[in-house]
Amino acid sequence: MAIVLGIESSCDETAASVCISGQVINNKIASQSIHSNYGGVVPELASRDHHKNIVPIVHEALNDAEINTKDLDAIAYTRGPGLLGSLLVGSSFAKAMAASLSIPIIPVHHMKAHILAHFIDEPKPPFPFICLTVSGGHTQIVKVDSPMDYTMLGQTLDDAVGEAFDKAANLLGLSYPGGAVIDKLAAEGNPHAFQFSTTEMQHLNYSFSGIKTSILHFLRKERKKNKLFIKDNLNDLAASIQRSLIDMLMNKLVKAATSQKINQVAIAGGVSANSELRKRLKVLAQENQWTTYIPNVQYCTDNAGMVSMSGHILYEKEQFGALDENPLPRMSF
Ligand code: KG4
Ligand code: ZN
């Protein structure tokens, strides 16, 4: 059984984790707060912060696991998708370290790693299962037949749902990233106070750009009547926006599970940390006789635990990479 170091650097988290014999021992993350000043991730600043953080965070994970570099059997790293400059820092570091130790590197697909986070803790989903993977850059409904075998059933054709949360938060004057802020404010609000028009796409696909425009126009109109409209209605606005987005996600998820006749249903990715989404999945589980799989919050948002676990799984299948492979910002699924 192998000892695998996992490194994640696809966006604005520099993270490292050690997995020993299939057990994720730790999950160390250096998050970058600098982007909150800009309302979104600034790629150049992200790369510079990864550069600063990668050595300390890898040291922290190894020290915490009481592992020496020479004990490592492989290094897994996120090859894509993500920001090129950010991916370059993690991949260059992983390759250099693996080359110096003469051990294999294991390239990992970031969105598949979000799904494989389900194999960190018990209960682990049996195959096949459906996974709704919802993050800042992606919204996907995937049928997972094995760790090597994925079928994309549906996805967003424009914005990701995390992006919709973040853009809506921005319109409400909240800080970036806004998903967790909306989640918190929504807890005290009425989810049916306001209605926004949503776009229903064909099949199992999504579109989240329309609701953003609908929120924008609604707020403009109301603020003409009352300058303090947002401030006076912040909790209700957050709850209503959150409800609309979750309704959209859940409608297609039910369709996917029904049409595939699969009742093992999982969620993954940053937006799966949303407390209302987690609650709603449990309600749907009762209505549809699903068994649901909801990851620990630390493995929903970007983390390296999911990368070291993916590394462990791929190591067993001898899925090793080469030192001349470049990062892939638009890595295909
Ligand atoms: O998976 P992730 O950490 O990074 C990407 O791969 O993109 O997802 C980040 C996204 C952001 O859009 C953030 O606002 C959203 O996840 N997010 C949430 C919550 N926590 C993070 N959205 C809604 N509710 C939350 N509690
Ligand atoms: Zn992610």
Image: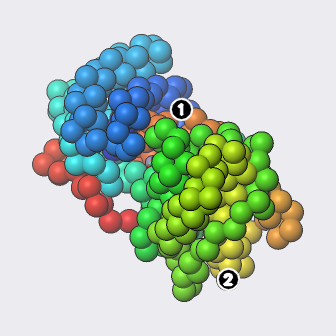
In this view, 148 is above or below 205:
above
| The furthest residue to the bottom | 202
Query: Which mark, by number, is residue 60?
Result: none
Look at the numbered discs 1 and 2 and tell me whether their residues touch, using CB distance below 8 Å. Answer: no
In this view, 72 is above or below 115:
above
Q: Amino acid at mark 2?
A: Ser
| SS under mark 2 | helix
Residue 169: percent from left, percent from top: 53, 48
| SS under mark 1 | strand
In this view, 149 is above or below 111:
below
Look at mark 1 in the image and give the residue it sits on.
24
Crowd rating for badge 1 (residues with CA inside 10 Å; few <14, some 14–19, many 20+): many
| The furthest residue to the front | 225
Look at mark 2 in the image and give the residue it sits on.
259
Q: Is residue 185 visible?
A: yes
Residue 45: percent from left, percent from top: 25, 34
Q: Total label count? A: 2
Residue 238: percent from left, percent from top: 66, 50
Query: Is the CB of the residue bearing disc 2 within 8 angstroms of ligand 1?
Result: no
* Mark nearer the N terminus (1 vs 2): 1
Q: Name the residue: 53% across, 61% down.
A: 220
Q: Name the residue: 58% across, 80% down.
A: 200
In this view, 181 is above or below 222:
above
User: Which quarter of the picture shows residue 131?
Assistant: bottom right
Q: Name the residue: 30% across, 60% down.
A: 331
Residue 168: percent from left, percent from top: 53, 54
**Foreground: disc 1 or disc 2:** 2
Which image quarter is the C terminus in? bottom left
